[in-house]
Every structure is written in structure tokens, then in C-alpha cells.
Amino acid sequence: MTGDDLARLLDLVRAELDQPDASAEDLWREPSHWDSLTLVNILFVSEERFGVTFTPEQMERVRGLVSLIATIDEACLASQQEDRHQDQHRGNGEHIAQQQLPEVTP
Amino acid sequence: MKVAFDSSRDAGSSTDAGDNEPELIRSLARSFRAFDSSLLDLFDAFESLGDCCEFNGIQLRHGVARPAFFNWRATTIPLLMELIGSDLAGVDTPGNLELRVHQPHPDAEAEYTVFNRHDGSYAHTFEYVGRVDPDLLLVRWQRKLKLLRRKFLADVRAARRIYLLRTWFRTEEEEVQRLADLLRRKGDNILLWVRVADLPSRAGKVQWLGPGLLLGEIDMLAPYEDAMAVKSLQWPRLLEEARQLVNKRAELCAAYRTERFA
């Protein structure tokens, strides 16, 4: 996670906690003081903001900011690997399609 | 935003006046922070389907505060059949949700509950009138339900946990078996049905009742009006026995597969 991403994440968490002035140290405590509604909402907006989809296992692992960052990183990596896999698959498909082009006879 | 006042039914009121989930969870979790981690694993192996919040409260006391769709929710078997059968269709549709105010008696703090017009279900929010913006609360609940719906459907397909249903009123075994069958159609799931033992000698015992269905008999259950009260100390024993039966079944299935395909 880049510095900008982290800053955006902290702002997102502050917004959900309704604590615009909370320091990073306050937010960094784990296990967290997040109630289940707040936790789920943070997961929801994190998915939207970072373009990831958490698995149930990942959702259960999040307890506070530290685990959230680790989980977002993991989800981003999984998403990138999936994209690469799909690109590779598409590339193979195009290669095969080119080989199978029928000859054009006048 | 208009909010309907609902005093027609006790919403399985599970907290004392003035309690709220954030503070309640924190105080319970703090007081039981030094609990046995093996008990935490045991209680975390189960997921409540209702019929009220009793088991959620007991899980909380053992350190399990995992968000789940049917947590803190009043249910009946017909409702569960409809919701699970339809893959929780409509539960997170914004137009179906409304906030209602629940106040079990005049001295209690008025709590918002989320009511679903589509299926008639409702859930505690543990947020209280005057303490929170109702419009914002509804938006947050819509998001929560969307996420938890997705999680429940993935979990039930993967059979990640043993589902637990307690019943207070007399319930026919066939009805519970139908719910167990429905869960088995979704995945390789097991349902533990907990009810008060017919005979004192049966209290604390667990047995297979049918495919995917265990019966756990307990000495007492918490009443609806005081669902967070700890009425029985038999829960750990009951859950351990259920888990052992499930594990034994898994071992037998694995051994059968090995033998058959060796």
C-alpha cells in the first residue's frame, strides 16, 4: 500500500468512525474499538475505494487498522494476479484463433 | 425521515435499558478477555440462525464478535426457509428496509430496529433514538446487509461452520429437518437444534436426529424478554459434543472414500 493509499484509508476510517480529528496512533490500536456495524461499513467502503472483493475469510480477519491494511494488500494482490491470469488466457486465445484462421481462396 | 414506532411485539429484546451493542460488546469482551482460547475456537465453530439472540450473547461472552447475517435477529423456521431458500433475496434492497422504533417498556431507551417489508424480518441495531442520525443509520445498514448477505451465501456453500438454531416453543422434528435439508442443498452443512431437554437426564446430550441434523438438549434456555441472560452453563459441553460428532462423521466419510476408491 502506498503512502497516498494509506492516507486515503485513514480518512475513510475517520469518516466511518465519525472522528475527523482522530490521530493515526488512535486509529492504530488493535484489537479495535470498532463495533460490528462500523467494521462492516469500513469493509464495504474499502472494497469500493480499492476496487477489491474480500473473501469471507478475509472479512473475519479484520479487527482493526493493521489487519485491514494487510487484508486490503492481500486482496489487491489477488486481484492483480487474477487480472494477469485473465490477460494471459486471453492472449493464448487470440494466438490460437490466429492459427486457426482459414485460408482465403479467390 | 419518518420512522415507524413498533410496540406490537417484543423484538426479542436482548439488552437492558440503556445498553447498546458497541458498549455492551466492549464491556463483555473486556471482562472475558482472559478466557480460554480453546473455548473461543469452540464457540467460533458455530453460527446462530436464531430464534433469538441468546447464542449471540453467549458467543460474545466467549470472545466471538464476528459479524454474521443472522446475528441479533429474531427468526422463525418459516422465515429461515424463505430467506435461505431464496438466497436472501431482497434483504439488502434499499426500498425494502425501514427503521422502526422499539421500546419494550416506557422506561427503556427507544432502540431503532431494521424492518424488512419484503419478508417481515427485523433486526436489532443497538442504536438509540436521539443518539444517531436515522437516515445515516439506514444507509449503513443497507451496506452491512449487502456485505453480510454475500458472506452468508459464500459460507453456506463452503459449510464453514455448524449452524445452530434454538427453539423455545414446541417444534416438530420434521420442520427442523426440512431446514437442515435446505442447508444441505446449499452445501455440506450441519444444523444443531438446541431445545430444553424433555427429561433432566437428557440435558447436555447431543445426538444425530437425521441427515445433517443434530439435536442438543439443554437444561434451560433464556426467555425472549431476557435473551442475554446466561441461564445455562451447559453450552460448552453441548457444543463440544456436537463438534465431536461432526468430526467423527467427517472421519468416517473420509475413511469410506479412501476404502472405496483404493
Image (cartoon, grey):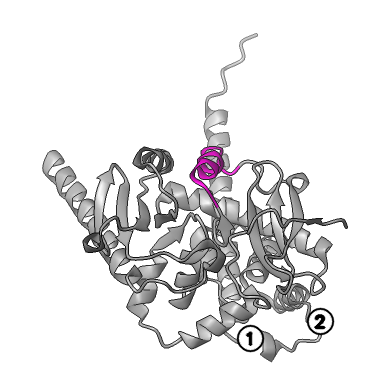
Disc 2 versus disc 1: distance between alpha carbons?
15 Å
Any magenta on residue B80?
yes
The magenta span reads B75-88
Find disc 1 in the rendering and name its residue.
A28
Which of marks 1 and 2 precedes in the sequence?
A: 2
Above or below residue B227? Residue A20 is: below
Q: Secondary structure at mark 2?
A: loop
Give neighbour class at mark 2: few <14, some 14-19, many 20+ (Cα, 10 Å): few
The location of residue B148, given as percent across then percent down, is 59, 56
The kind of residue tagged 1 is Trp
Give neighbour class at mark 1: few <14, some 14-19, many 20+ (Cα, 10 Å): some
Above or below residue B8? Residue B108 is: below
The location of residue B13, given as percent across then percent down, is 60, 65
Furthest residue toward top: A106
The kind of residue tagged 2 is Pro
Say which of A101 and B7 sits in front. Answer: B7
**At x 55% / y 61%, what residue is drawn?**
B71
Residue A20 numbered tag: 2
- Say left or right for B111 vs A91: right
- Say left or right for B253 vs A63: left
Q: Could one spot residue B69 in this view of the protein? A: no
Q: Quadrant of the C terminus of chain A?
A: top right
**At x 40% / y 61%, what residue is drawn?**
B46
**Prevalent SS, magenta region:** helix
